[in-house]
């Protein structure tokens, strides 16, 4: 098994601890991060990534980001997971996604998350998690 998943797990731990500066240590200075492929323009560079993470941090509490499956091919890591957290007003948001991370050495240089932001928007507005989302969440975390 490759070691890229271990790097992502360290990044996840830093994010759950709300340590933005530590999260950024896993990214290259010129990272290109598509937070929502084809929905939002990419974030380019660490300064822009810091701004995005700072904005996210204010809205995310009790973060339980989980990875259900992963595969590594060369310098690329593929993951399937869920961003699961509470909003400041107590709404649960659990958004299944697939992601692709490109590495150069041990740094992430490219990050593409494939996610349906309308699912998150409905949950942020107070809608309960749908049955299909709940079914996706009821799986073991990848070893």
Image (spheres, rainbow, N blue to C red):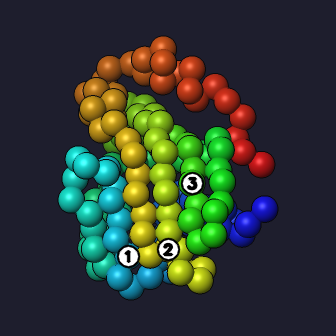
Q: Which mark is residue 108?
A: 2
Residue that numbered label 3 is attached to: 78
Residue 78, position as x, y percentages in the image: 57, 54
Work out whether mark 3 precedes mark 2 in sequence or the reverse, and give the earlier one: 3
Residue at 35% from the left image edge and 82% from the top image edge: 30
User: Does 103 appear above or below 41?
Assistant: below
Residue 61, position as x, y percentages in the image: 44, 47
* In this picture, residue 34 sits left or right of residue 19: left
Residue 24 seen anywhere in this rendered image of the structure: no
**How crowded is the residue under tag 1: few (<14 C-alpha within 10 Å), some, or many (20+)?**
many
Q: Which mark is residue 31?
A: 1
Residue 5, position as x, y percentages in the image: 66, 62
Contact (Cβ within 8 Å) of mark 2 with mark 1: yes
Mark 2 and mark 1: span between their CA atoms? 7 Å
Mark 3 and mark 1: span between their CA atoms? 17 Å
Indicate the secondary structure of the residue bearing disc 2.
strand
Indicate the secondary structure of the residue bearing disc 3.
strand
* In this picture, residue 97 sits left or right of residue 12: left
Between tags 3 and 1, which lies in front?
3
**How crowded is the residue under tag 3: few (<14 C-alpha within 10 Å), some, or many (20+)?**
some
- Res 4 → quadrant: bottom right
Residue at 27% from the left image edge and 67% from the top image edge: 43
Between tags 3 and 2, which lies in front?
3
């Amino acid at each position: 098994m490759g070691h890229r998943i271990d790097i992502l797990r360290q990044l996840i731990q830093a994010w759950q601890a709300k340590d933005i500066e530590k999260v950024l240590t896993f990214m290259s200075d010129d990272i290109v991060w598509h937070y929502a492929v084809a929905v939002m323009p990419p974030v380019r560079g660490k300064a822009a990534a810091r701004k995005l993470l700072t904005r996210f941090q204010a809205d995310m509490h009790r973060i339980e980001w989980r990875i259900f499956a992963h595969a590594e091919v060369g310098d690329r890591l593929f993951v399937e997971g869920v961003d699961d957290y509470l909003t400041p007003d107590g709404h649960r948001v659990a958004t299944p996604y697939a992601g692709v991370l490109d590495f150069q050495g041990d740094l992430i240089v490219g990050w593409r998350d494939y996610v349906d932001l309308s699912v998150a928007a409905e949950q942020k507005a107070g809608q309960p998690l749908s049955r299909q989302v709940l079914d996706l969440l009821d799986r073991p975390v990848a070893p």
